[in-house]
Image (tube, rainbow, N blue to C red):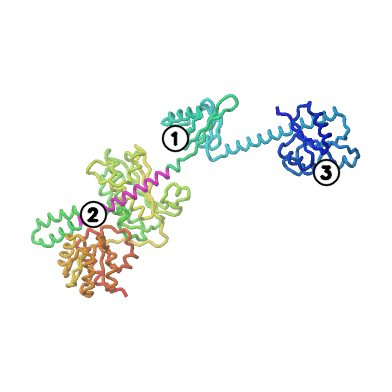
Amino acid sequence: MNQPATILVVDDMVANRETLCELLHAEDYRLIEAADGATALRLAVEALPDLVLLDVLMPGMDGYEVCRRLRADPRLAEVPVIIVTALDDQASRLAGLEAGADDFVTNPFNRAELRARVRSVTRLNRYRRLLEVQTTLRESQERYHKMLMFSPDAHCVHVDGLITFVNEAFYRLMGATDPAQLLGRPALETVHPDHRDLVRERQQKILNDEPMPSSEMKFIRLDGISVDVEVASIAFDFRDHQEVQVIARDITERKRRDVQYLQAQKMEALGQFSGGIAHDFNNILSAIVGYTQLAQLMLKENPDVRGHLGAVLKSANRATALVRQILTFSRQQPEERLPIDLRPIMAESIELLRATIPAGIAFDTSVATDAPAVLANAGQIHQILMNLGINAWHAMKEDFSGRLQVNLERCVVDAAHAATQPRLRPGLYARISVSDTGKGMDPATLRRIFEPFFTTKLPGEGTGLGLAVVHGIMDSHDGAVTVYSQPGEGSIFHLYFPAYAGVALAVASADEGPVPRGEGERILVVDDEDLLAQLGQKTLFALGYKVEITTQPAAALAMVRAAPQRFALVLTDQSMPGMTGIVLANQLRQIRPEMPVILMTGYSVALTPEVLEAAGVRQLLLKPLNIHSLGTAVHAALSAKSPQ
């Protein structure tokens, strides 16, 4: 408001403009002149004058039209206009006022009176503009305040280290119910002690006008709970002091998702690695189990040696079970899933746990009658319950006492609950809970419990695969496993199985019975490991078959192509250099469509029923094989009718 007022003088007569300018010069106005209406309109837009002194009688565009156009332009509509003209009749005055003029002065005029009118109008106009600016500023401040108060990001302002302003998002982030709980408190108290040195360093740089990128840190809520936040800060001068504005965004959920994603990536990588190891072990175990069983057949008259071989076979079977657990963790172990009722499996598993766990451990069980049926593998459910039960016992055995609780219940997962677990979807579940009163686990242990080979047990007490297997089984069942534990408070595992809409089947078990024998049928065995190919030959020969072997898939094709009817069945490994068993089966089908093929594998990635059927594979056998499973599969494949 210290700058002089701007007045636009519009008149086609030079003498009239000079008179007006000379009159107003002493008042220290900024004067602009225009000789016609078009020029006046252009200069008015450029200068935004505080007053227009306007003649009426001008060529091209008279003063009335100029006035109307000024009023029609939103930028100029509020600029005061005083018409200064020689016209003195009432009609001219009325026309000027109707065109939008604020005053009408007849020439010749009283010089003092005109100066007074100009002074009054310009002063009022400048006050009007000041009020407009103040109103706009106030509205802007109100909008900014509302934006801050209702921003999803948390905003805090502090002066000399004390909080002077917080928005709703900030005080809710800090666990407060009212801003007054935070105002006047030291801002540094909101920061986790581990990050206060970082905040002090950031603040010093900000106050020195050094640019600072956002940082991740932890805040401490009023209830003592820590939250992960991403923080940006700016410093600014306000009146006679400096203020610091802090903008914080709650990233706790994002960090949790990141941890879950990294854990899933780690589990996937470990699963692939474990699957590769298990495949190699299966080939080794195939030779151990197979040759041990052959030796037992050949030593029927020597019970002592057969007993020693039985011990070898027992250890090999334990190793086979361990490999199966690794494959289950890596989700490469095919297991048939059927619609079943979990209650009888729970009862059987609990009975076995009671017989295994010392009597000092108390058992509590609760099995809901309305728990839904699920699509599951009964053996794997049994394995989960045994793994979790044994783990619970180990967590409590230091005191030789404790309580193990196993529950089965109907559970409806809503959207809010599902959002906390990536593998859960809203819907109906059967939930198994296994809890103990043991020593519990700290957060560092909880982050690793599902990793294979990670264990807190003493050497010799476990392999570290139990919970990894649980995790793998739950993944393969499209379910989820969650765990809650605190040191000294025990642990509780929740297993979520999606409900099955159909009718559950009864779970049955069957004895192996005698090994079916052959009647001299000729079988071709294909395996790139000569030791395993010879094992297959000797085993099938002992079961009454004629056997030829090859370690080259291409050679097998040539043998069948040369005599398509020579072989009653082909038994082939899956993983072989140059040609997989599936590719070999497809090639054999082109030579002889009805040729029975049995596929052996140490793992089963991508070997879906559709893939096997398309290749003409009658049976899929998992290594290591035993005599009974091999003999049964061969007999079944030879007895089945050829596909039409």
Residue for point 82% across, 35% down: 14
Q: Amino acid at mark 2?
A: Asp
- Magenta range: 256-285
Which mark, residue 59? 3
Residue nearest the viewer, comparing 148 with 355:
148
Judging from the image, what secondary structure is the residue with disc 1 in?
Answer: strand
Closer to the observer: label 3 or label 2?
A: 3
- From the image, give the main secondary structure of the stretch colored magenta: helix
Q: Amino acid at mark 3?
A: Pro
Residue for point 10% across, 58% down: 303
Residue nearest the viewer, comparing 168 with 490:
168
Give the percent coordinates (x, y) of residue 505. 35, 62
Which mark, residue 218? 1
Callout 1 environment at 10 Å: few (<14), some (14 to 19), or many (20+)?
A: many
Residue found at the very far left of the displayed protein: 301
Give the percent coordinates (x, y) of residue 83. 83, 37
Callout 2 environment at 10 Å: few (<14), some (14 to 19), or many (20+)?
A: few
Callout 3 environment at 10 Å: few (<14), some (14 to 19), or many (20+)?
A: few
Residue for point 45% across, 38% down: 228
Q: Sequence order check: which comes first, mark 1 or mark 2?
A: 1
Q: Amino acid at mark 1?
A: Lys
Residue found at the very far right of the displayed protein: 89
Q: Are marks 3 and 2 in contact (CB under 8 Å)?
A: no
Separation of marks 1 and 2 at Cα, in angstroms:
47 Å
Which mark, residue 280? 2
In this rendering, would 607 be left or right of 31?
left
